[in-house]
Image (cartoon, helix red, strand yellow):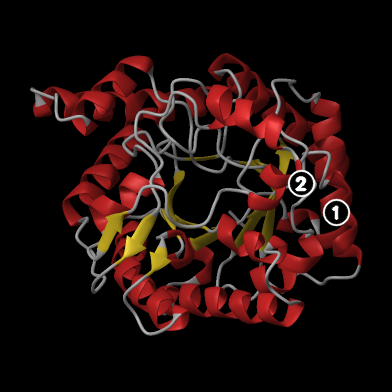
Amino acid sequence: MPGANRILTTHVGSLPRPTDLLDLMKARIEGRLTDVAAYDARVRGAVAEIVRQQVDVALDIVGDGELSKQGFFVYVRERLTGFEARPGKGKKLFAAEVAAFPEYYEGYFKRAMLGGSVAPILPMFCVGPVTYRGQAALKTDLDNLRAACDAAGATTAFVPSTAPSGAGENAYYKGEEEFLFAVGEALREEYLAIVEAGFLVQIDDPFLSDIFVEPDLTRAQMDKRAEAYVASVNHALRGIPPEKVRFHTCYGINEGPRIHEAALADVAAHMLRINAGYYSFEAANCRHEHEYHLWENVKLPEGKTIIPGVITHASNIVEHPRLIAERIVRFARLVGRENVIAGADCGFSSQACYHTEVHPKVMWEKFRALVEGARLATKQLWG
């Protein structure tokens, strides 16, 4: 990707699943699935379709849309040993935001972000030794993506995987750091397999940003926890070339007031210590768009690339290509044109859900605008 002499485009990972696939997923979760072969074939076909659509709109770096995953809560239970669901327990989602705007979020979670999910959102707790057991499911995912890329002519693709901090809460290991390293060691098998299959691995870690809005922590405690998160990721990534690794952090919610979110300035120093070649973060939503100024004072390390969100997953308004180009150029003039890839703020369907925040048809228009904006930015930056 370095040396492309233009602004490349990508997205963050999750994309809306077809309705018939959601129906099959729901049947599988509820124990009603009678034809496993038909289910597997539909997943394979859906991945082929979604990759072809990404190629058709001219995205440069594609993914499988996470179409085989019901969401990361189910994913943890299926791919790691030592976890159990504990309904009603654990940390509340976006506690400060919900406490400040309870009336808004009560309706919002029902109608949008969590409404229509095929799988219940259940907190996961570690209750025993953590090991990796997702080899078969992972191989299927990688085989499906390889076949889809070969058929569509896609040359570069990425596969998201959760960070150790995203697995759940510790109720077994002596301390949080021991827990994080155990999870990281288990997930390392997945990270390695993704890279060995010829793909980029994307470490998804919205939980890094969440640290800096936890009301019960002092700033020193926040930094200490963030350091543990970073150390566990780097432990899991040891020996993997940074140029094969994307790291993504965000704020985990879509449309809302979003007042109680970390500033990029709080997160950036920790993010840049991750042994990755690419850093993806929110930059298009209006609570964070001004934060491009951070790069006036923070130096991007040599050989690293940023993937700022220049379209948002939190609105059905399609950004104008000229605005997208303007956003890209801002970053390029601060960190170097060769060090910017144009991306999205976050995924468009983090959970397998019948009601996505952004309508699928609108999402594809956003991607077309993203590609056109990158073309306009390339013209300004390269002439």
Residue 8, placed above or below residue 191: above
Q: Which mark is residue 157?
A: none
> Residue 2 is drawn in which quadrant?
bottom right
Quarter holding the C terminus? Answer: top right
Q: Callout 1: helix, strand or loop? A: helix
- The residue lying toward the viewer, choosing from 357 and 234, is 357
Q: Position of residue 263 (x, y in %)?
A: 79, 59
Q: Nearer the N terminus, badge 2 or badge 1?
A: 2
CA gap, disc 2 and disc 1: 7 Å
Name which residue lies at 14% across and 30% down: 31
Q: Position of residue 380 (x, y in %)?
A: 87, 39
Residue 231, placed above or below residue 3: below
Is residue 313 something one can see in this rendering? no
Q: Position of residue 138 (x, y in %)?
A: 25, 50
- The residue lying toward the viewer, choosing from 182 and 278, is 182
Task: Say which residue label 2 marks.
Answer: 283
Is residue 220 something one can see in this rendering? yes
Name which residue lies at 52% across and 56% down: 91
Q: Residues within 10 Å of mark 2 (few under 14, many from 20)?
A: many
Q: Position of residue 347 (x, y in %)?
A: 55, 38
> Residue 342 is drawn in which quadrant?
top right
Amino acid at pointer 2: Ala
Q: In this view, does 173 lie to the left or right of 363?
A: left
Query: Does the CB distance between marks 2 and 1 fall below 8 Å?
Result: yes
Amino acid at pointer 1: Tyr
Q: Callout 2: helix, strand or loop? A: loop
Name which residue lies at 54% across and 26% down: 110
Q: Which mark is residue 292?
A: 1
Q: Is residue 287 left or right of residue 338?
A: right
Q: How crowded is mark 1: few (under 14 residues within 10 Å), some or many (20 or more)?
A: some
Q: Is residue 266 left or right of residue 30?
A: right
